[in-house]
């Protein structure tokens, strides 16, 4: 199987197991020893370099207010050592976010993420998301 197709499959499994299913320990199968969040405005980890344990902690903290989140992959594009994924995300808001107590409302967001690979391991990402849309949904009655 060509590298591009293999990496698309790896990324799809990673998004399902780690982010949708919430298995932070599964990150051990996917994340390189060093992972860089190159660009992710509004994310507390933007610009940070994480080791595997730091990445797993990021998953746990990020998922806490939205434990039942779901990522739906829309498109995957590969180029060299990078795979771009466009996605739709939804989750009931079940835990507190600073200034926003749990509301039970289903929140939706879209985004696009470039994931970087070294072999079959993820080494970082560059992401854009609709965080303003999330804020508006959380702020509405």
Image (tube, rainbow, N blue to C red):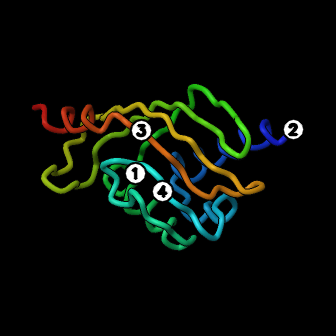
Residue at position x 30%, y 49% in the image: 42
The residue carrying pointer 1 sits among few (fewer than 14), some (14 to 19) or many (20 or more) residues within 10 Å by Cα, namely some
Label 1 vs 2, first from the N-terminus: 2
Q: Which residue is mark 1?
A: 67
For the residues labelled 3 and 2, the Cα–Cα distance comes to: 28 Å
Q: Which residue is mark 3?
A: 128
For the residues labelled 1 and 4, the Cα–Cα distance comes to: 22 Å
Q: Which residue is mark 2?
A: 2
The residue carrying pointer 3 sits among few (fewer than 14), some (14 to 19) or many (20 or more) residues within 10 Å by Cα, namely some
> Circles 3 and 4: CB distance less than 8 Å?
no
For the residues labelled 1 and 2, the Cα–Cα distance comes to: 35 Å
Q: Residue furthest top?
A: 74
> Circles 2 and 4: CB distance less than 8 Å?
no
Label 3 vs 2, first from the N-terminus: 2
Residue nearer the viewer, 140 or 6: 6
> Circles 1 and 4: CB distance less than 8 Å?
no
Q: Which residue is mark 4?
A: 37
Residue at position x 59%, y 46% in the image: 115
Residue nearer the viewer, 25 or 118: 118
Label 1 vs 4, first from the N-terminus: 4
Q: How many marks?
A: 4
Residue at position x 48%, y 56% in the image: 37
Label 2 vs 4, first from the N-terminus: 2
Q: Residue furthest right?
A: 1
Residue 8: percent from left, percent from top: 71, 38
For the residues labelled 2 and 4, the Cα–Cα distance comes to: 26 Å
**Side of 13 where 103 appears, left or right:** left
> Circles 3 and 2: CB distance less than 8 Å?
no
Looking at the figure, which quarter contains the N terminus? top right
């Amino acid at each position: 199987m060509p590298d591009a197709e293999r990496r698309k499959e790896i990324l799809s499994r990673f998004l399902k197991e780690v982010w949708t299913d919430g298995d932070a320990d599964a990150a051990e199968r996917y994340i390189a020893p060093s992972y860089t969040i190159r660009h992710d405005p509004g994310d507390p980890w933007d610009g940070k370099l994480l080791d595997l344990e730091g990445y797993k902690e990021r998953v746990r903290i990020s998922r806490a207010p939205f434990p039942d989140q779901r990522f739906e992959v829309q498109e995957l594009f590969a180029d060299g050592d990078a795979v771009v994924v466009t996605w739709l995300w939804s989750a009931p808001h079940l835990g507190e976010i600073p200034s926003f107590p749990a509301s039970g409302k289903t929140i939706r967001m879209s985004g696009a993420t470039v994931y970087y690979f070294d072999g079959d391991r993820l080494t970082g990402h560059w992401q854009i998301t609709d965080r303003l849309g999330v804020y508006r949904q959380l702020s509405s009655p």
